[in-house]
Image (cartoon, rainbow, N blue to C red):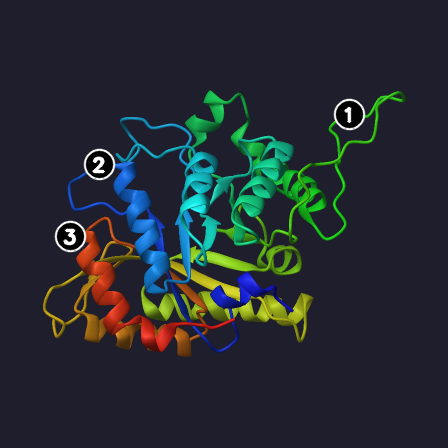
Amino acid sequence: MPGVIEHTVFAEGRLSIGLTLPMLSSGNAVADFDEQIALARLADELGFAALWVRDVPLNSSDYPDPVGHLDPWVLLGAVASHTKNIALASGAIVLTLRHPLHIAKGAVSVNTLSRGRFILGLGSGDRPHEYAAFGIDANERREVYRRHWDTVAAAIGREPRVIPDQSPPDAPEFFLLPTSPTPVPMIAVGSGGQSVDWIARNAIGLMTYHREPEKQRARYSMWRAAVDRVAPGEFRAFGVAMGLDLAADQNEAAEPRSLGYRTGSNDLIRILREMRENGTHHVTLNLQASKRPTREILEELAAEVLPEFQIRA
């Protein structure tokens, strides 16, 4: 049974809507983080389900994302202190490039600051050269991911315990303080090189990127089959990150774009209904492609789209 904050984001037969930070206008690669905090507060007030924060340790000329992302723990801490109800999620902390005990400390810290509103999304990263910059062999990422996941899960679970890398005979028993107000739910963002059975067994769910509807239905069917195999009768969430360029004309027909759509709000509602019917429980919208003022987009989404897709605790 999911906790309260999980239930407002992920629920059987329902679909909720979140937003990905930063929210930038088209062509703008430099975020005004005072504005981002103000937009986070607005999203909270308007009733969006979650705010997702990415982890981009290093930028490079061959990396297609030109945005200068803040360290996720710094941004999550700031957002936690300026919001009250909205869930906060990492999408995703690069589990393989950070020490798992540092990740656990960050997760407990954000969960404490947000009073139990944090969902820890974990990914493996996908750039071999970035692995090399950190002195890690990219070919070992699957094993590192599993090992680090187990250490984080032990440290932030219902009966938290620290699993040290090394434990000499005279070592004390370590623990994390402050104590988290609630266990921190862990969701896999991407596969991390793991099987869907492993993810269904160890995570509260799977977040993936937008695909053409038929391919996404097949992906969900594979996920559902894995859940039925390893956790029969239990709920496991399925979420999607989707790009959105919301047209000013509410009746503008949806046009597929890279990892999402340009569409008016009426066709967006149709798309979200179909996603809900096909098994998606949460969609986080990436508004970076939009040419409209972000505040205007959030207010339109809240007025026209959210009423059908909000989940109450």
Q: Residue at x 18, y 39 (%)?
A: 28
The answer to whether mark 1 and mark 3 are in CB contact below 8 A is no
Locate residue 279, reporting x and y percent.
46, 73
- Residue under numbered circle 3: 293
**How far apart are labels 3 and 2 at the CA level?**
15 Å
Amino acid bearing label 3: Pro
> Which structural element holds mark 3?
loop
Q: Is residue 22 visible?
A: no
> Which structural element holds mark 1?
loop
Residue occupying the far right of the picture: 169
Dividing the picture into quadrants, the one containing residue 285 is bottom left
Q: Nearer the viewer, residue 281 or 116?
A: 116
Q: Residue at x 57, y 40 (%)?
A: 109
**How far apart are labels 1 and 3 at the CA level?**
52 Å
Q: Residue at x 66, y 69 (%)?
A: 229
1 or 3: mark nearer the eye: 3
Dividing the picture into quadrants, the one containing residue 99 is top right
Q: Is residue 112 visible?
A: yes
- Residue under numbered circle 1: 166
Name the side, left or right, on which 155 lies relative to 271. Answer: right
Question: Relative to residue 130, is residue 188 depicted above or below?
Answer: below
Q: Earlier in the sequence, mark 1 or mark 3?
A: 1
| Residue 219, disc | none
Locate residue 63, reporting x and y percent.
31, 33
Packing grade of label 1 (10 A; few <14, some 14-19, many >=20) is few
- Residue under numbered circle 2: 29
